[in-house]
Image (spheres, rainbow, N blue to C red):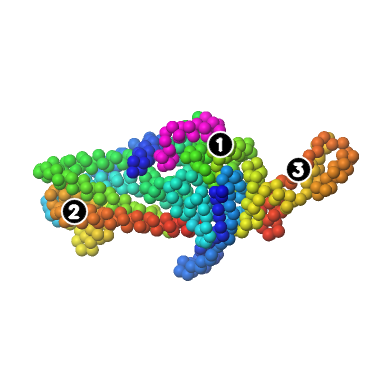
Amino acid sequence: MARYFRLLLVRLRVSVQLGSQYRSDFLVGGVMALFWLSWNLVPMWVVWQKRPMIAGWSFPEALLVAAWFTLMRGVLEGAVQPSLVAVVEHIRQGTLDFVLLKPADAQFLVSTAKFESWRAADAIGALVIGGYALHRVAHPPAASAIAVALLLTLAGAAVLYAVAIVVVAAAFWVVRLDNLIYLFNSIFDAARWPLTVFRGFWRILFTFIIPLGLITTYPAMALLNKLDWPTALRALGGAMLFVALARVAWTRALKHYTSASS
Amino acid sequence: MNLISVEHLTKEYRVHERPPGLMASLHSVFHRKYKIARAVDDLSFSIRSGERVGFLGPNGAGKTTTLKVLSGLLHPTAGTVRVSGFDPRRREHDFLQRITLVMGQKQQLLWDLPPADTFTMNRAIYDIPKQEFDETLSELSSLLELGKLVERPTRQLSLGERMKCELVAALLHRPKVLFLDEPTIGLDVSMQAELRTFLKKYNERFEATILLTSHYMDDVTALCPRVIVIDRGHLTYDGDLTQLVHKVRPHKRIVLRMHDGKQETHDVAPSDLKATITRLLSGDPISDLTVEDPPLEEVMRDLFAERGDRVTNS
């Protein structure tokens, strides 16, 4: 365990070094992150201008969901996707062999290959939006609510990671993945809205199949004291199930690779 | 004791047959035809600890496939493989700590960062203690005369410099078994020689076992007392390099250099050697005369020519 933690630190350091190799990229990246952050809030602001409450959410409450959306998008595009893209490249060029030759868990190596460090701007943005939203909501959350929200945040990140691993597993069969990544990013965009905004098919899709609700709405609900315990526990269980499924998909993909590639 | 043992190894791939032409291509989207390609066919050999063995054969003979099976990247279709007491297929931690695979055509160095950063990363992956890491790195660096090279971004290094650093990255954990797939490909003659000297030193210093494929016969001649020749997945020769040469090309080669710079070569049977040299010496005045074995390239060409193959090991 300690070894993997050390390894993660080395990987992070290398990513920061890589990021700062191209200083202008680093700066432009940060500025772009701030731009997208504000741009993402515009539609919400427009909609809540018309009505004070939508599907049980006031504007400041919905802003809290947007804060989690910003944070999770930073996690997705800063910590999850860069590695994913790198693996696909590895598979295409055959350099995945070097990963498999290392005496460490291949899934770990593959998913820590690259981080976009300037995406930390998203986390700062999320803190600012979240802080403002909480200030407007007026009643400060209890310590237990904060703890549950943090736990659900970890669970949400784990689900994002699991989905990404399943996508990588698919890359062992389908080599062109750009479309799949684009599709997932477009779907993920829906996570900026509170889950209750959606009805019928979409609600089911975003609750169980691609659990965007778990990733952004549930932590915000926990903080607002709106989430009941059974739902929180089910969400945590669901996240673990996702991670387990991802592991199975990864193991199968690796087996396919080692028996099929040349 | 055998460090590597391969028994009746067979490796098959399922390949999609892609017919030429647009209509045929569209048709193949719905009705795929697969055929089984056998890359390695009932191959058996064993290698003792500390040996340096050359693995020869034309392109597509199954050399790389065998190396990948030995290093656990591919699973055998049939047969058994043991390396250092392990089943490579299981990719156990202790097994991976003991081996390395260097592929001349692929690189593990981080392109935008200096090689030193890849070394640090491998140190973390292999969990090498700091002191041991420093010792190994300085020893490998001095053997390869790396100097300040490791502090420059990889993308600014020449091919030869990069290959040296690739070797260091692959050897930092002091592996006992080295699988080298074309480690000198694309390098100039002096760099090739440098790497050969290094590999020999590493073999002696760490008592490592080396299995090497190369397109450059000089690599094999200089490094490997023993060769294993495979062709279309079959074993065609396993044994002493000099004996292989004598078996395929029993003739000795006499090279004569005249005063005017001209050169003549005569291939003669060993029994006729003395008579031929006497005859040649009694002719025109010469400046030099050498007797040598025919170059390994020609031996290989002869060995595979009977099969009607294009021999690429030259």
- Answer yes or no: do the residues labelled 2 and 3 have beta carbons within 8 Å? no
Left or right of B252 in this view: A136? left
Q: Number of labelled discs?
A: 3
Q: Amino acid at mark 2?
A: Ala
Left or right of A150 in this view: A137? left
Find disc 1 in the rendering and name its residue: B205
Find disc 2 in the rendering and name its residue: A232
Q: Chain of mark 3?
A: B
Q: Which secondary structure, mark 1?
A: helix
Q: Amino acid at mark 3?
A: Glu
Looking at the image, which residue sits at the far left? Answer: A139
- The quarter of the picture where residue A175 lies is bottom left
**Mark in the foreground, 1 or 2:** 1
**Mark in the foreground, 1 or 3:** 1
**Alpha carbons under labels 1 and 3: distance apart:** 31 Å
Q: Is B93 rendered above or below residue A172?
A: above
Left or right of B53 in this view: A110? left
Compare residues A56 and A242 and report the one nearer the observer. A242
Name the main secondary structure of what is drawn in magenta. helix
Q: Which residues are magenta?
A: B121-147
Relative image position of residue B150 (x, y in whole percent): 49, 33
Q: Chain of mark 2?
A: A
